Image: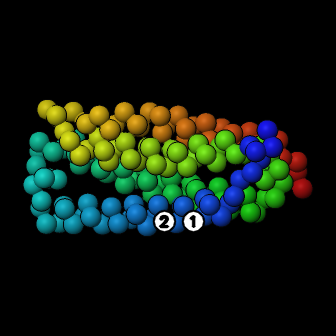
Amino acid sequence: MSEDREVDPTLHLRFGWWVLLGFICLGLLLEALHGFKIRFYLDLSNETRRLLWTLAHAHGVLLAILNLVFAASLRSFPELQRQPLGTASRCLLGATVLLPGGFFLGGLFIWAGDPGPGVALVPLGGFLLLWAVFQVALAAQRTPKA
């Protein structure tokens, strides 16, 4: 169980900033596709793609910020680092990749208005996120008051 205690806040700090940069770039790309009226993105037949890529952008930014908040929480509350958060850390990292990645991949190939198979990653990413947040909330509850 000691390996579950080892959480590197610097990993989440670096990962969070890079993921945030990537999804801000995706947002700018989506704005450009909209601004230049690119049919691949704007046609009515591509509404599913537009929705899924917007969801990928929004979830990616949110999860990047959540990684930064997790890193800041670990650094601000040293007693939180004494809690077993290794699983929560790995689940948060996985969710950050799978949740927006599933939305993005699901929007790459659309079949008759339905998302592509990549969208199957979304529920797994959602579960990992739920588990990570639950574990951190539980650890915060167990942390003694200062």
Counting other residues with Cα less than 10 Å from the Cα at mark 1, is it few (<14), some (14-19), or many (20 or more)?
A: some
Q: Position of residue 8 (x, y in %)?
A: 69, 58
- Foreground pick, 31 / 25: 25
Say above or below: 6 vs 75: above
Picture disc at residue 130: none
Query: Looking at the image, do the residues carrying marks 2 and 1 touch, with CB atoms under 8 Å apart?
Result: yes
Assign a secondary structure to mark 1: helix
Q: Write down the quadrant of residue 29 in the picture.
A: bottom left
| Residue drawn at 32 percent across, 47 percent down | 104
Q: Is residue 54 visible?
A: yes
Task: Work out which quarter of the rendered image holds the C terminus and state it.
Answer: bottom right
Q: Position of residue 89 (x, y in %)?
A: 64, 48
Picture disc at residue 14: 1
The residue at the far front in this view is 3
Q: Is residue 120 left or right of residue 107?
A: right
Counting other residues with Cα less than 10 Å from the Cα at mark 2, is it few (<14), some (14-19), or many (20 or more)?
A: few
Type of amino acid at the residue the image marks with label 1: Arg
Type of amino acid at the residue the image marks with label 2: Trp
Q: Is residue 113 left or right of residue 4?
A: left
| Residue drawn at 13 percent across, 53 percent down | 40
| Residue drawn at 74 percent across, 43 percent down | 4
What's the CA distance linking mark 2 and mark 1? 6 Å
Q: Is residue 95 left or right of residue 111?
A: right
In the picture of the structure, the residue carrying the numbered disc 2 is 18
Q: Write down the quadrant of residue 31 in the picture.
A: bottom left
- Foreground pick, 25 / 42: 25
Q: Is residue 55 visible?
A: no
